[in-house]
Image (cartoon, rainbow, N blue to C red):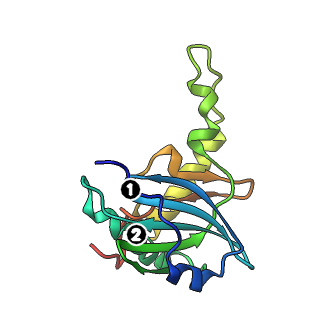
Amino acid sequence: MSQPGPYELPDSAVNALNPLSQRLIMNRRGTTLWEVRTPDKFFAVKIGYPTEAHQWTALAPAREISILRQLTPEPHFSGTWGRGTWGAQPWRFGNSLYDRWEHHRAGPDYPEPDLRDAAQCTAALAALHRKRWVHGDIQPAHLIMSSERTFLIDLALAQGGAGPR
């Protein structure tokens, strides 16, 4: 089966966000991800669609927004479209732990990683656990590190709270 998409922002997302610009970030495994600039801020907009391997990916964006609404008071938007759901959440500026530690994977002479990075990532995960949630898909690419803090992203598989099962 060929990779469908990328899919454009659904009309309901355009109406909710009033985008000034958008940039395609990726399209794979049931998700098209856009960085969207609005008059007020930047959003990560995920458009979910079913794949042959995983039908549930069509529902993942709305599930993630349902979880994020329980974890943070920031603005989140979601809706449906012809092939699934979409969700918009604040864009997290920074570098993923995966990208930040890329040079540590360069070969046998790689430098030692900065353990402060690991401590910041651990603190972000501990904060989620204190709220009685587990991530469900923790990996270095899901930790975005800025100069102020570390964010966990991709919470569609998280468990805890009152999230949809």
Marking on residue 60: none
- Quarter of the picture holding the C terminus: bottom left
In depth, the one of 108 and 56 nearer the eye is 56
**Residue 106: x, y in percent?**
59, 21
The numbered mark, 1 or 2, whose residue comes first in the sequence reads 1
Image depth: mark 1 or mark 2 in front: 1
> Which corner quadrant of the image does residue 43 belong to?
bottom right
In depth, the one of 143 and 127 nearer the eye is 143
Q: Residue at x 54, y 73 (%)?
A: 88
99 up-or-down from 45: above or below: above
19 up-or-down from 4: above or below: below
**Residue furthest to the top:** 108
45 up-or-down from 29: above or below: below
Q: Residue at x 65, y 22 (%)?
A: 111
**Residue 16: x, y in percent?**
58, 85
* Secondary structure at numbered mark 2: loop
Q: Is residue 32 left or right of residue 111?
A: left
C-alpha span from label 1 to label 2: 36 Å
Which residue has dot 1 on it?
4
Q: Amino acid at mark 2?
A: Arg
Q: Residue at x 56, y 72 (%)?
A: 89
Which residue has dot 2 on it?
132
**Residue 120: x, y in percent?**
61, 50
